[in-house]
Amino acid sequence: MLPFRSEIRNSPTQATIKIFLSDESLDERIKKHLGHFKEIEEIELRESIGQNRVGENITVFLKEGIDINKMKQSIDSSLWWYFEEDLVD
């Protein structure tokens, strides 16, 4: 099982990036890890609704004018690095 999955979600008000962790106990640590991105306006932990989903997700709101596709790639790369480092320790 992969340590995380991320998706771009479009809503009427603002596109977001949702991150689903396979280990929900890491939600707060990952939220803190993502705090170093200056392009992120806000990060929230939210209850997931839907089939075959984890109980919570991390929802990332970007500042205005930020390319959501590039940010998703940056976040994904950062999370892969985070989990690879964690597995080595």
Image: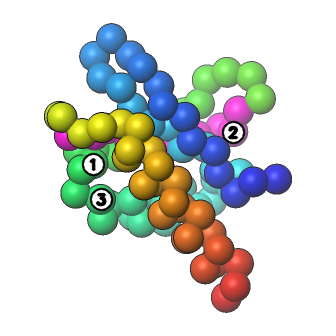
Image side of residue 55 versus residue 1, left or right: left
Please name the amino acid that badge 2 sits on.
Answer: Val
Residue with the most extreme right position = 1
Q: How is the image coloured?
A: rainbow
Which contiguous range is marked in magenta?
53-63
Please rate how many residues cluster around mark 2, counting C-alpha atoms within 10 Å: few if below 14, some from 14 to 19, many from 20: some
Residue with the most extreme left position = 64
- Image quadrant assignment for residue 10: top left
Residue with the most extreme top position = 12
Q: Is residue 43 magenta?
A: no
Q: Residue at x 67, y 88 (%)?
A: 89
- Image quadrant assignment for residue 2: bottom right
Q: Which mark is residue 54?
A: 2
Image position, residue 67 (x, y; %): 30, 37
Q: Are marks 1 and 3 in contact (CB under 8 Å)?
A: yes
Q: Which residue is mark 1?
A: 40
Q: Is residue 65 above or below residue 14?
A: below
| SS class, disc 1 | strand
Specify which label sits upstream in the sequence, 2 or 1. 1
Distance from Cα at disc 3 to Cα at disc 2:
24 Å
Q: Is residue 60 magenta?
A: yes
Distance from Cα at disc 2 to Cα at disc 1:
23 Å
Q: Residue at x 45, y 54 (%)?
A: 75
Image position, residue 27 (x, y; %): 54, 55
| SS class, disc 3 | loop
Q: Residue at x 50, y 37 (%)?
A: 18
Asked if residue 59 can be seen in this view, the reply is: no
Q: Which residue is mark 3?
A: 37
| SS class, disc 2 | loop
